[in-house]
Amino acid sequence: MAGHSGDRLVRAHEQAGGRLASRAPVLREEREQREAAELRPGAALAVGAGERAIREEPDPERTCFERDRDRIVHSAAFRRLAGKTQVVVFPSDHQRTRLTHALEVAQVATSIARGVGANVTLAEAIALGHDCGHGPGGHASEDAFDAFLSEGYDHGPWGADVVLTNLNLCAQTLDGIRNHSWSRPVPATIEGEIVSWADRIAYCAHDLEDAAGAGIVSLDDLPAEVADLTGRTRRQQLGTFVRAVIATATRTGSIGMAEEPAAALASLRAFNYERIYTRPDSLAQSEAVIAVLHGLVEFYVEHPLSLPLAFVAPDQGADGRVRAAVTYVAGMTDRFAFDTAVDLLGWDPDRLPKGIGRGA
């Protein structure tokens, strides 16, 4: 269908819809001026093309952080998150993947950023890209790849410094991705700090919801200090924690929480670790993931010509071969990694990780 013509234009619908007042397009420079006028002092401001490793000309329509967000959303690394574990391998249709987690972190981060007067677009870009460094099989992949890299494998720095380097993102976006984990140095921007909180808030709430839906835990078992303050549902918990960060930031200027809600979040996270992440079935899943990924990396180190050409360079040396193998395997989705282990290594399918919960 070619649309509906009339008045020298083509509409999607036969009848005319609403109308905007005629005016010039809202271009980058005007949006930058609005940021400078409206954002709270201390927020990151988009200026020109942004601070990038490779210099670029400014985009006429989009701010530098808008370009970063768009590049992440359209990247292969972001798309592959749909096939990577959040908590459960082979998730049901209703359980989170690494992609849906990133989207939920972005929603929490933008809510907080909007509420405190920070740069919403930068927070969104960091949130969408924050887990692009994760390998297949969830956090177990970090334990698997640690064995091959002298500096260890951390999904934040790996995402910023390896996976997303081809996007030539702004320094502020990469810094937030690199340092979103609480074990890392403090991010350089308020927006990066917001994503650090948004990540923890989002996964604590939605991992609990997924586990309850799978029959792994009962919401009735939540500690009283969590249930009494935040409720038992994801919606209640997100609202409580988001408002807690906004209240603290508007009162003190720092990104954090008052002690009571922070203690509730910590208690919720501890409950998840005990009842979900470190339960026997979850540990067995992690051990199976590590075994598969070790087998794949070892194969590609020994047979570097089996790697796609993009990962093969002349005179790589031993360290280069290892890094190339880790880079390739880390980029795999769960299913591709497990299928490759069966097809390429002759891996016994019974040794593959198993789904957890109802229907597994």
Image: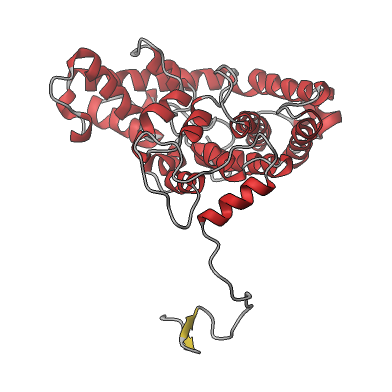
**Residue 43, percent across and down?**
64, 37
Question: From the viewer's perspective, is residue 46 above or below residue 256?
Answer: below
The residue that appears at 55% across and 62% down in the rendered structure is 26
**Residue 128, percent across and down?**
52, 40
The residue that appears at 69% across and 19% down in the rendered structure is 270
Circle count: 0
Q: Quadrant of the N terminus?
A: bottom left
- Residue situated in front as seen by the camera: 55 or 17: 55
- Residue situated in front as seen by the camera: 344 or 4: 4
Residue 237 vs residue 177: left or right?
A: right
Q: Quadrant of residue 260?
A: top right
Scheme of colours in the image: secondary structure
Residue 319 vs residue 188: left or right?
A: left
- Viewer can see residue 53: yes
- Residue situated in front as seen by the camera: 180 or 47: 47
Question: From the viewer's perspective, is residue 33 above or below residue 179?
Answer: below
Question: From the viewer's perspective, is residue 348 above or below residue 102?
Answer: above
- Viewer can see residue 130: no
The residue that appears at 42% across and 49% down in the rendered structure is 58
**Residue 181, percent across and down?**
56, 23
- Residue situated in front as seen by the camera: 176 or 99: 176
Question: From the viewer's perspective, is residue 276 above or below residue 28?
Answer: above
Residue 176 vs residue 248: left or right?
A: left
